[in-house]
Image (cartoon, rainbow, N blue to C red):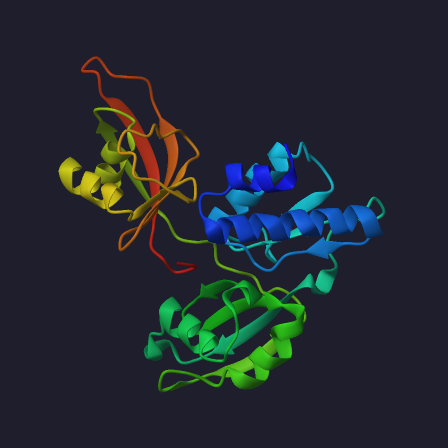
Amino acid sequence: MDKREMLDRLAANGDERLLLGRVWDKYEQCRRRNLPQGTGFLSPAEQAAAQRLLNALSVSEGYTFWGGYDGAQRRQLWFLPDWQEAPEEDAVRVVRASFYEEDSLTHRDILGSVMGLGLERHCIGDIVLEAERAILFCEHSMVEHLRDSLLSAGRIRLQTALLSELPELAPPEGTEWRDTVASPRLDAVVASGCRLSRSKAADLINGGQVKLRHLPTQRTDAQVEAGDMISVRGFGRLQVQEIGSPTRKGRYPLKMLLFGDKRNP
């Protein structure tokens, strides 16, 4: 199978085909030049697509996903030569934007201001929002522009600074949720985690509002497994921790962590 045929088979749409083509080019450049090659920041869905390509190419080593800190959602994909074990330290840079706690800025406020500077989304990694600051991860080439130009979010003034070291980040706060469901199907799990009727959960899935394992799906009967991440637009994220064996009544014990959307859309 040649390159064109493989891209046609693996890509779900034209945009994904372009992405996979760029990833393949980076892989080949690293092999040919024996120099590190990296992509821009990829969303979790784009990372999953890139991983499918690498699996299809039987590439199992010599690459890493990196977003600047452990647990990052948006990450770059780096192909590394045999003499290098990790991306350069400045592959991902960090900017702190400070404000007053009573300003109550949201992730959308910060991201909107960043996009208003003319930056493309692949230049920006995670935006971690805390009480009095936002920590922004970005490409090396964009860090000074971001520091010097991100002066406000809406009417709120920001104080920005370039950080040489990653600050201590508070772990995302998840709310534990336990329930039993009739089946470990996606519609049943979404209904439980979002406190919805099963028919309403099915409507969200059929309407393209739900992602399973970072990929959009309209399969209400998709089987959910322990470790899966489910994103529901307007509700947040559900991290499935445990799915137990059926009870005597045939229901499945379920344990999840429920997260809001403080980090990334």
Count of numbered labels shown in the rendering? 0
Pinpoint residue 145: horizontal percent, then vertical percent.
Answer: 60, 81
Pinpoint residue 135: horizontal percent, then vertical percent.
Answer: 52, 68
Taking the spot 76% from the left edge, 51% from the top edge, the residue there is 29
Pinpoint residue 106: horizontal percent, then vertical percent.
Answer: 36, 70
Of residues 11 and 115, which is closer to you in this image?
11
Of residues 239 and 22, which is closer to you in this image?
22
Quadrant that contains the C terminus: bottom left
Query: Does residue 157 lie above or below 177 as drawn?
Result: below
Residue 34 can be seen in this image: no
Query: Does residue 263 lie above or below 186 as drawn?
Result: below
Compared across the picture, whether 130 is left or right of 8 comes to left
Indicate the quadrant where residue 122 lies. bottom right
Compared across the picture, whether 199 is left or right of 183 comes to left
Query: Does residue 198 lie above or below 15 as drawn?
Result: above
Pinpoint residue 128: horizontal percent, then vertical percent.
Answer: 47, 63
